[in-house]
Image (cartoon, helix red, strand yellow):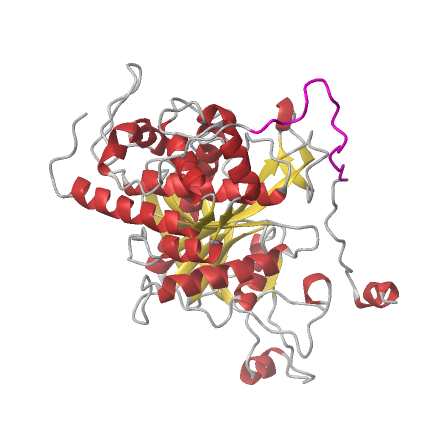
């Protein structure tokens, strides 16, 4: 195998070796086996179908019993591992800022009654069906740093498994606070830098996320449903006097902006037109200081004091075509930043389109690295396996400049530095001898006697019902009725 001739491969080997040593230090129990399991993940031929098959890989020097013992009873210092990931070189957008994407991906476990803490996970079009379904599984919230341009690369920074009593917005806000704090402590963000842009999909309420993340150097950018109704800024006393000469109490909110009624939009504060290769002509319009009218219901039911007015910039994006040939419906975005000009508006909607790169990462984790393949019993073992997948993907990213293009005969050649994660993993076995391997050699041992042949298992596993997300009251009356 040939390596790139410039200084890139040498620096890539150095960074990957330091990361491997840091990862090994984070594995506080059964570390040798867990570390070799990550190497087996990267050196296996083809997609990973089962963890036990990884014990047959040459780089895995221990038996299958050690693998199960490590997944079930191993330990890792997750807070330290988060800081290690935050200290790596971060991908940045075209304007130099950090862009983070947040999304939930589910590890479906429909046929695992002995696995605890399963929830009903929302999925689309499973088993050839087009309707929405709810399948038992473990939902995980992931945070990743996005790159600029068309790419399937991004850096995973954190993963949290969601429980039945968790409020997704509050858990995500706490997760992001931890990630942003680690980035600041590890020197990846400084006071003179632009605010970190955090991109959400329509499953999150962007104004509420901006409220929960208040005080951090971040800007929230989220997709809004097309049936939303928001409000313009509160009119000044002079504007109100001119509009209502008969007087009266000044309103707290301006007039409505209904996404479905163009006559309510008014003139935009900024408008841009961009010609793209994938989407044709992209037309964006933006309205400044648009906010939702909050009520003491649902997420704001326990809010004390006067409800806040969360102002931001509303962006409407319309394109000529979609890469898949679907109907290009308009896209509504809301940014927590105000006073944006035309160039800033283009940066926002382009950054949102990069959010879909995390979907490529989920596909790699599930179809190639086998994230959802193991049939683990405890959720704690699932968490350990998830972090091992993140450690494996991070090594692939660090070695992308040093890998050769070991393509199949039917694949097109890739430009240097433009290999996909799957192609970089294909050559990891050739890169591994150049990297630090802190795992110690296994000690010779004999297997235990196990259960006598022909005897029955007298300790059957506990069965668990699928947990349902706790239903929260929608109004104050309902909340008071549910209280003892």
Asked whether residue 269 appears in the rendered view, the answer is no
Asked whether, in this view, residue 478 is left or right of residue 117, the answer is right
Asked whether residue 263 appears in the rendered view, the answer is yes
> Which residues, given as a range, are shown in magenta?
448-464
Q: In this view, does 273 lie above or below 52?
A: below
Residue at (60, 71) in percent of width and height = 254
Which quarter shows the C terminus?
Answer: bottom right
Write down the quadrant of residue 8 in the picture. top left
Asked whether, in this view, residue 1 is left or right of residue 41, the answer is left
Residue that extends furthest to the left in the rendered view of this protein = 5
Residue at (51, 70) in percent of width and height = 214
Q: Is residue 40 above or below residue 81?
A: above
Q: Where does residue 401 sit, x and y in percent of width and height? A: 23, 38
Which quarter shows the N terminus?
Answer: top left
Q: Where does residue 286 sit, x and y in percent of width and height? A: 45, 59
Q: Is residue 239 magenta?
A: no
Q: In this view, does 245 lie above or below 3?
A: below
Front one among 375 and 210: 375
Q: Where does residue 369 sit, x and y in percent of width and height? A: 45, 32
Asked whether, in this view, residue 108 is left or right of residue 198, the answer is right
Residue at (36, 24) in percent of width and height = 58
Per the picture, the main secondary structure of the magenta-coloured stretch is loop
Q: Is residue 462 magenta?
A: yes
Q: How many labels does the image show?
A: 0
Front one among 186 and 194: 186
Residue at (52, 58) in percent of width and height = 175
Q: Where does residue 412 sit, x and y in percent of width and height? A: 27, 21
């Amino acid at each position: 195998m040939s390596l790139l001739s410039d200084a890139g491969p040498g620096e890539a080997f150095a960074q990957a070796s330091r990361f491997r040593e840091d990862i090994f230090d984070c594995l506080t129990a059964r570390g040798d086996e867990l570390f070799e399991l990550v190497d087996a993940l990267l050196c296996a031929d083809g997609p990973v179908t089962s963890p036990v098959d990884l014990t047959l890989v040459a780089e895995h020097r221990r038996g299958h019993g050690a693998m199960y013992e490590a997944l079930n009873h191993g330990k890792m210092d997750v807070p330290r591992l988060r800081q290690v990931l935050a200290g790596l070189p971060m991908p940045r957008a075209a304007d130099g800022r950090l862009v983070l994407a947040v999304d939930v991906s589910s590890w479906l476990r429909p046929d695992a009654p002995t696995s605890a803490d399963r929830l009903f996970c929302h999925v689309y079009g499973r088993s050839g069906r087009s309707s929405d379904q709810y399948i038992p599984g473990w939902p995980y919230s992931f945070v990743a740093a996005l790159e600029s341009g068309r790419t399937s690369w991004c850096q995973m920074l954190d993963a949290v498994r969601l429980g039945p009593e968790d409020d997704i917005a509050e858990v995500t806000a706490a997760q992001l606070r931890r990630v942003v704090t680690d980035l600041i402590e590890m020197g990846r963000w400084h006071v003179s830098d632009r605010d970190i842009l955090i991109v959400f999909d329509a499953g999150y309420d962007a104004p509420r996320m901006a409220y929960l993340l208040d005080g951090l150097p971040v800007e929230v950018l989220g997709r809004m449903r097309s049936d939303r109704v928001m409000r313009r800024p509160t009119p000044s006393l002079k504007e109100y006097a001119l509009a209502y000469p008969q007087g009266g109490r000044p309103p707290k909110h301006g007039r409505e902006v209904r996404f479905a009624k163009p006559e309510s939009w008014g003139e935009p504060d900024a408008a841009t037109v961009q010609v793209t290769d994938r989407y044709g002509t992209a037309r964006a319009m933006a309205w400044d200081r648009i906010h939702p009218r909050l009520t003491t219901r649902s997420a704001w039911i326990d809010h004390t004091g006067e409800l806040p007015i969360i102002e931001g910039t509303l962006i409407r994006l319309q394109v000529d075509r979609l890469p898949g040939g679907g109907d290009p419906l308009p896209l509504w975005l809301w940014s927590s930043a105000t006073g944006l000009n035309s160039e800033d508006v283009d940066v926002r909607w382009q950054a949102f389109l990069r959010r879909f790169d995390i979907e490529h990462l989920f596909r790699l984790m599930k179809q190639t690295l086998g994230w959802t393949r193991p049939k683990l019993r405890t959720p704690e073992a699932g968490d350990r396996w998830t972090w091992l997948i993140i450690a494996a993907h991070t090594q692939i990213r660090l070695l992308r400049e040093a890998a050769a293009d070991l393509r199949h005969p039917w694949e097109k050649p890739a430009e240097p530095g433009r290999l996909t994660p799957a192609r970089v993993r294909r050559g990891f076995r050739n890169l591994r001898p150049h990297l630090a391997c802190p795992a110690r050699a296994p000690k010779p041992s004999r297997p235990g006697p196990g259960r006598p042949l022909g005897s029955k298992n007298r300790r059957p596993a506990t069965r668990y019902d699928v947990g349902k997300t706790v239903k929260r009251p929608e109004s104050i009356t309902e909340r008071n009725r549910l209280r003892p």
